[in-house]
Image: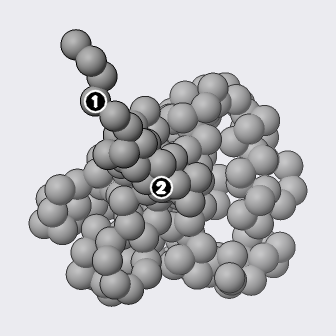
Amino acid sequence: MEVHSTKAMAARAVDLCVALLHEPPSAESVSRVLRDHGETGDLDLGEADVTAMRAAAARLREVLGAATVGEAADLLNRMLAGSARAPRLTSHGGTTSWHVHVDSGDDVPWAEWFLASSAMALAVLLADHQRVPGGLCAARGCGRPYLDLGGGSPRRYCSTRCATRERVAAHRTRTSPPTPG
């Protein structure tokens, strides 16, 4: 998947949300996710950046947890109105291929970039697929966000592991003998 494609940017957004909201976040763990998604060079990510990105991740999680496409669209519109600027092309001084940014510059704080680029990617996917572009895992005790771009039935779980765990628990409940009592 091209690093700067809409799907890749949305996948990065979801992976960052998981790292920021479902694990004890640190500059190192967030940097690892960014590098896994193609960021290069000195990331210069500090704890203040992680804290601000965590707040942005909480807002993005609301979009993925929206009950309707209209609710998700309203949330994204508010995020874009507050964080996005006119689209611009950048190659970061020739260090990457040309791609679109909707933040205010190449040297903005990480949280501004994260919220603006993620909201834009999720908005494009919502418009393309006419549905919320992801969800929150339905497995008990999980709640991790996930991206859902497939056709057919919407996903309910963040991973095969969570889906299997829920199916096994439901099967055990159905097939276990009633407890005397």
Q: Which of 47 and 65 is in front in this view?
A: 65
- Image height check: is 156 above or below 91? above
Residue 50: where, in percent of width, then height?
Answer: 61, 33
Residue at point 73%, 33% (across, down)? 27
Q: Foreground mark, 1 or 2?
A: 1
Residue at point 78%, 47% (across, down)? 32
Q: Which residue position is annotated with label 1?
A: 178
Q: Can residue 84 be seen in this view?
A: no
Task: Give the quadrant of residue 4.
Answer: bottom right
Q: Nearer the viewer, residue 80 or 22?
A: 22
**The C terminus lies in quadrant:** top left
- Protein image colouring: one colour
Amino acid beneath label 2: Ala
Residue 16: where, in percent of width, then height?
Answer: 58, 49
Residue at point 43%, 33% (across, down)? 141
In this picture, residue 54 sits left or right of residue 119: right
Mark 1 or mark 2, earlier in chain: 2
Residue at point 18%, 68% (across, down)? 69
Disc 1 on helix, strand or loop?
A: loop
Disc 2 on helix, strand or loop?
A: helix
- Image height check: is 90 above or below 32? below
Amino acid beneath label 1: Pro
In this picture, residue 64 sits left or right of residue 48: left
Q: Which of 131 and 56 is in front in this view?
A: 131
In this picture, residue 1 sits left or right of residue 100: right
In this picture, residue 13 sits left or right of residue 62: right
Q: Which residue position is annotated with label 2?
A: 163
